[in-house]
Amino acid sequence: MTRKICGVLLAVVSLLAAVSLWAHHSPSAIFDMSKRIGMTGTLTKIDWINPHIVVYIDAKAEDGKAESWVFESNPPAWFRRVGVGRADFAKSIGQSVKVEGVGAKDRSLYGYLQKITFADGVSLELTNAADER
C-alpha cells in the first residue's frame, strides 16, 4: 500500500513539473522572432494572469475583414517591476491602441507583444523576461 501511494505521489509531482516547464516557455518556441507584425486596433480584454498576461485586440486585416488577435506578453511581475499595473491596461479597454510584436510560427492570429502605444500616446516597450537573466 505504501509503495502505491509513493508511486502515485511521484507521478503527480512529475506531472506538475512537466506542466510548469511547458507553461514557462521561451517566446521563440511558439513565435517566429523574425516575423515582425504591427497593427492598430481596439483593446477588448486583458487577462492579468501568470505565467504571461494576455492582451486581446480587434483589428482589420489588409483586406478590411475584422480579426481578433491575441497577444501574449511578459508576466505580471515584470509589469509591476516597471511600474505598470492591471489598471493601466484596463482603462484603455475599448480604446484604440497600436501594437508591435512577432507572429506565431503557425501563422494564426496569435502574437508576442513587444510594444504597445495607448490612445493617450503613452507607450510601453517590453523586453523578454528571459532576456533579463
Image (cartoon, grey):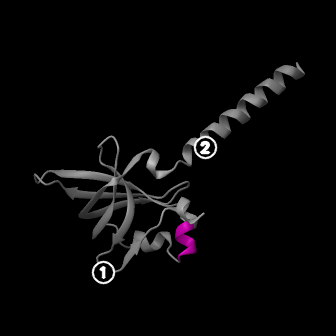
Left or right placement of residue 38 versus residue 102 in this view: left
Left or right placement of residue 5 versus residue 12 in this view: right
Q: Is residue 81 magenta?
A: yes
Q: Is residue 28 above or below residue 36?
A: above
Q: Please give the label number shown on residue 101.
A: none
Q: Identify residue type, mark 2.
A: Leu
Which residue is the extreme one toward the right? 2
Residue 23: quarter of image = top right
Q: Is residue 29 above or below residue 125?
A: above
Q: Earlier in the sequence, mark 1 or mark 2?
A: 2
Q: Which residue is mark 2?
A: 21
Q: Please give the label number shown on residue 121.
A: 1
Residue 46: quarter of image = bottom left
* Secondary element type, mark 1: loop
Q: Residue at (39%, 64%) from the top-left corner?
A: 114
* Secondary element type, mark 2: helix
Determine crowd level at label 1: few under 14, some 14-19, many 20+ residues with C-alpha closer than 10 A: few
Which residue is the extreme one toward the left? 63
Q: Residue at (62%, 44%) from the top-left corner?
A: 20
**Residue 88 position within the rendered picture, expressed as x and y whole percent measured from the top left:** 44, 74
Decide which of 129, 42 is in the foreground and name it. Answer: 129
Q: CA distance from mark 1 to mark 2?
A: 37 Å
Q: Identify residue type, mark 1.
A: Gly
**Residue 108 position within the rendered picture, expressed as x and y whole percent measured from the top left:** 30, 43
- Which quarter of the rendered picture does the C terminus lie within? bottom right
Decide which of 115, 34 is in the foreground and name it. Answer: 34
Main SS, magenta region, reads helix
| Image: magenta residue range | 78-82
